[in-house]
Amino acid sequence: VDGLRYAWGTPRLRILLAFFVSVMLIGFPHVTLIPGLLENQMGRPSQDVTRYALASAVGAFATAITVARFADSPRALRIYGAMALAFGLALAALALAPSFGAGIGAMVLVGASSGGFHALNGAVVARETEPVYMGRVLSLTFLAFAAFSLSALPIGLLADAYGERRVLFGMGLAVFAVAAWMSWQLGRARSLRGVA
């Protein structure tokens, strides 16, 4: 409660936490749609999900290593926003992938963009947080991991009703829109800690 109160009273931190949680809730349940996408849209066995997971992991690992060096950079926030925008576009590309092979390429991009977003999240949140509140604020970001599992059920029901491609494409557009809006809001909000 103390961490929530502090975060709510710190404008840029409040936006950053809303940014992260929104992207997590909207975009990260894509993993629950992959087996259905493979079986229903691409005519592949759902066991091929392991190949898509590997492609995503390779992209995430490569990008996380690359962007980690920018964690203390004045550009960290811009890169963070760009990774979220790219994640939305990558999800849309996955939804439009015409074949299994094209889907693997899209999954590399999904992993790369979401991995970069994750890798910088702790750094950008920490830069806006006073040291005494660091543990309480960072623990709030971990709640998003539990929350995204809850959004998997309604997203799965939507996929059953409208198809995996449509729902995945909608998720991508929604992530892109949220990232664009939150990035603009961050640009307008003044940091209380003098961080650019």
Image: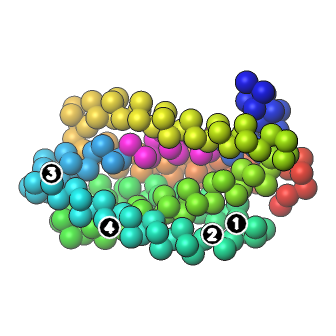
**Is disc 1 placed on a helix, strand or loop?**
loop
For the residue pair 68 and 33, the one nearer the viewer reads as 68
Highlighted range, magenta: 18-29
Q: Identify the mark at residue 55; answer none if there is no mark.
A: 4
Check disc 4: other Cα within 10 Å, few if <14, some if 14-19, many if 20+.
Answer: many
Q: Is residue 5 left or right of residue 168?
A: right
Q: Is residue 146 above or below residue 19?
A: above
Q: Is residue 152 left or right of residue 73?
A: left
Residue 50: x %, y % from top left:
23, 59
**Is disc 4 placed on a helix, strand or loop?**
helix
Question: Reading the chain from its start, which is encountered first: label 4 or label 3?
Answer: 3
| Among the 4 quarters of the image, the one containing residue 118 | bottom right
Cα separation, mark 3 vs mark 1, equals 37 Å
Q: Is residue 99 left or right of residue 140?
A: left
- What amino acid is labelled 3 in the image? Ser
Contact between labelled residues 1 and 2, with CB atoms less than 8 Å apart: yes
The residue under the point 22% across, 41% down is 163
Disc 2 target residue: 68
Question: Reading the chain from its start, which is encountered first: label 2 or label 3?
Answer: 3
Q: Is residue 123 above or below residue 28?
A: below
| Quadrant in which the C terminus is drawn | bottom right
**Is disc 2 placed on a helix, strand or loop?**
helix
